[in-house]
Image (spheres, grey):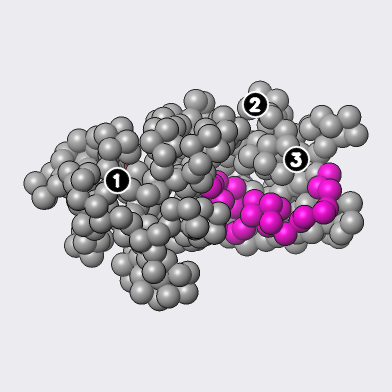
Amino acid sequence: MGRYDLALIGFGGVNRALAELMSQNGDRLAEELGFALRVVAITDLRAGSLVDTDGIDLAPLLAAEPGELSFAGLAGGSADPRNEWVIREVPADIVVEATFTNPTDGEPALSHVRWALESGKHVCTTNKGPVALAGRALKRLAAERGVGFEFEGSVLSGTPVLRTAERMFGGLEITGVQGIMNGTSNYILGRLEEGIELSAAIAEAQELGYAEADPTADIEGHDVQLKVMILANEVLGADLRREDVFCEGISSLTPHEVRDAASKGLRWKLVGSATRHEDGSVDARVTPLALPAQHPLAGICGPVNAVAFHTDLLGTVTVSGPGAGRTETAYALLSDITAIHQRHGDDDSAPTCPVLKETHRV
Ligand SMILES: NC(=O)c1ccc[n+]([C@@H]2O[C@H](COP(=O)([O-])OP(=O)(O)OC[C@H]3O[C@@H](n4cnc5c(N)ncnc54)[C@H](OP(=O)(O)O)[C@@H]3O)[C@@H](O)[C@H]2O)c1
């Protein structure tokens, strides 16, 4: 059985959840997927970096409280994240990027992904920044180096939206996409419909763990804007920049407006959409819309997300499921690794070469 050695960049909610899956279900996953996984490096802003090319024992790391974890003092550990050195020099097969999303320039994740691809390593990431802002260039770099670059979790966490479009729609023409792609704003809209004021609904979403301490990106639509860019670029072949995607959030909606619409059979939703026109141009936007009850997105409630694909031969096909959650998003990484195995497994998924391991021992 082949094995992939992983370097985890960022050890917050998502990459810890991936480590938990590997630690708790590693044998079952290996049997089912046909390859084994091992972590050989972890870097994190707070914890530092840890390298063991024989495989890191994850259990003691996972037993520590996230805020308490420090790699300094451990064999192969350092207080310094050493991202570039770890990504370029440690002989991992796949770099798993899960640091924070920077919507302005994608950094530092963009550099992490670039360093990995330049070094001939496969990359999977849940980080919207590099994918939305530089996806085309990164895909070109990956193709030049003959490695995989996968990012399913950047749109609807583990719900397979990008891969459904890529793999299941052969022969169909996709003319547009519309989605509810932010669970926090969708939950809040549901509460407005029940008469709760916006500020109280936001506080409730924060208590439930749906909303960040700073909910601006969710409320003002910026999170959805990046996801629309990814969908438009991936599914409709566009090359949109952030300024090309009009963005309006839900902060100006009142409970009265939302309830009034509901009494008329309409549901306010924050909809991200992209449409391809006959001349090939793609128009994309994020805006609140009052949808009629029969619209495929009208019944998507609470923190659930959905994307509706408009196609020529099938009409509208809607995929719905979780759009966030550390385990759900870790599953996206697992599905990315599986995709890398399926695409590149014949070339390089042979059991990791022990000679290489010895040569590169750090
Ligand atoms: N959680 C979800 O439901 C979800 C869903 C879809 C996509 N995503 C995306 O997935 C990524 C990870 O999400 P998450 O929930 O795991 O976030 P998180 O809990 O904030 O974890 C991010 C981790 O990366 C570390 N980090 C930040 N900058 C770094 C750097 N330069 N080098 C090394 N480590 C660095 C952070 O350290 P500090 O804590 O010290 O800053 C933190 O431990 C984000 O881009 C997020 O947008 C998350």
In the rendered view of the protein, which quadrant contains the N terminus?
bottom left
- Can you tell which mark lies on residue 236? 3
Q: Is residue 158 magenta?
A: yes
Along the line of sight, which residue is nearer the eye, 44 or 53? 53
Element at badge 2? loop
* Magenta highlight range: 150-175
Cα–Cα span, label 1 and label 3: 36 Å
Among the two numbered marks 1 and 2 on one chain, the one whose residue lies closer to the N terminus = 1
Cα–Cα span, label 2 and label 3: 14 Å
The reply to whether residue 217 is visible in this rendering is no
Q: Which residue is mark 1?
A: 91
The reply to whether residue 276 is visible in this rendering is yes
The residue lying at 30 percent from left, 32 percent from top is 84
Among the two numbered marks 1 and 3 on one chain, the one whose residue lies closer to the N terminus = 1
Along the line of sight, which residue is nearer the eye, 100 or 115? 115
Among the two numbered marks 2 and 3 on one chain, the one whose residue lies closer to the N terminus = 3
Q: Which residue is mark 2?
A: 241
Q: In screen coordinates, is 297 left or right of 343?
A: right
Q: Position of residue 250 (x, y in %)?
A: 66, 40
